[in-house]
Image: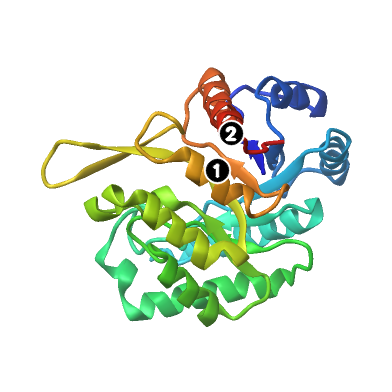
């Protein structure tokens, strides 16, 4: 497996970017450019990814393709198509988004998120994005969320079946699906279930930890790997079983030093458990 994460320091060119990648001890990277970068700039970064034996794991398409605002929905669909085309051009493992939300905040909980007609809209939006690009080397994926489709491995399997596109695959974020106390208490079993059911379709992974506050009715909070209650030796073995070039990314950290710490935590656990992390 490979490890990567965000870059919180500014960079202006591939030389500055690769120095940050080295400092962070990344072997996997997120896309360093957007779809609107010049062909020359895209090629320069792509050449560096190959030169330094990195794997481009994800191109983000963080927009709301099912927005209740028609103008926003159209703009989001266009952006997602452009980012998927970028993933294809850059030969990324996948392009990742969330399904979207039916309210003002693009990633928040709304009753309508789970309505049958909205599920149909999600299926149609994913198909439209994939069909517009028809990728051959990359995949469009949906990151699971605690309060929208898909929020369980079984629901993700159903979504794969209903979308029915070869270029639709899985982005694994098991922490986002630990959305109730029972899943938290049985997190090892639940995470194993996620990998057992979705493993053949996974193209990239977000790795986070979590702890539960003693508050009512329930408060589960994510944290960096190694600082919560998850069995990270078990998690890294699940990741390792998906292949040497499977990408796993730490996320939602604020500083360069936090990303460096998180990656080192993962590498230390891997070394202790005799797990190969490139």
- Which circle marks residue 109 in the picture? none
Question: Would you place residue 247 above or below residue 211 in this image?
Answer: below
Residue 178 position within the rendered picture, expressed as x and y whole percent measured from the top left: 34, 52
Label 2: few (<14), some (14–19) or many (≥20) C-alpha neighbours in 10 Å: many
- The reply to whether discs 1 and 2 touch (Cβ–Cβ < 8 Å) is yes
Mark 2: secondary structure: helix
Q: Toward which corner of the image does residue 231 lie, by quadrant?
A: top left
Q: Which residue is mark 1?
A: 236
Q: Earlier in the sequence, mark 1 or mark 2?
A: 1
| Along the line of sight, the residue nearer the viewer: 277 or 22 | 277
> How much space separates mark 1 and mark 2, taking CA atoms?
7 Å
Residue 154 position within the rendered picture, expressed as x and y whole percent measured from the top left: 42, 71
Drawn side of residue 62 relative to residue 15, left or right: left
Label 1: few (<14), some (14–19) or many (≥20) C-alpha neighbours in 10 Å: many
Question: Would you place residue 270 above or below residue 149 in this image?
Answer: above
Q: Which residue is mark 2?
A: 270
Drawn side of residue 205 relative to residue 52, left or right: left
């Amino acid at each position: 497996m490979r490890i990567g994460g965000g870059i919180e320091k500014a960079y202006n060119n591939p030389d500055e970017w690769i120095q940050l990648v080295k400092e962070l001890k990344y072997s996997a990277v997120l896309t360093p450019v957007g779809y609107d970068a010049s062909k020359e700039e895209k090629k320069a970064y792509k050449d560096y990814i190959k030169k330094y034996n990195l794997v481009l794991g994800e191109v983000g398409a963080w927009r709301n393709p099912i927005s209740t605002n028609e103008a926003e929905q159209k703009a989001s669909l266009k952006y997602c198509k452009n980012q998927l085309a970028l993933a294809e051009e850059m030969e990324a493992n996948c392009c990742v988004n969330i399904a979207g939300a039916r309210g003002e905040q693009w990633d928040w909980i709304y009753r309508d998120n789970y309505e049958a007609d909205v599920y149909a809209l999600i299926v149609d939006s994913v198909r439209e994005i994939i069909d517009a690009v028809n990728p051959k080397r990359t995949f469009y994926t949906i990151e699971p969320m605690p309060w929208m489709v898909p929020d369980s491995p079984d629901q993700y399997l159903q979504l794969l079946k209903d979308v029915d596109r070869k270029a639709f695959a899985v982005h694994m974020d098991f922490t986002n699906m630990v959305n109730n106390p029972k899943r938290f208490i049985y997190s090892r079993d639940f995470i194993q279930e996620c990998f057992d059911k979705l493993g053949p379709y996974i193209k990239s992974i977000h790795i986070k930890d979590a702890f539960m506050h003693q508050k009512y009715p329930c408060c589960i909070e994510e944290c960096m790997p190694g600082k919560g209650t998850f069995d990270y030796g078990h998690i890294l073995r699940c990741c390792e079983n998906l292949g040497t070039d499977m990408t796993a990314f730490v996320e939602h950290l604020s500083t360069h030093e936090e990303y460096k710490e998180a990656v080192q935590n993962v590498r230390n656990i891997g070394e202790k458990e005799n797990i190969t992390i490139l």
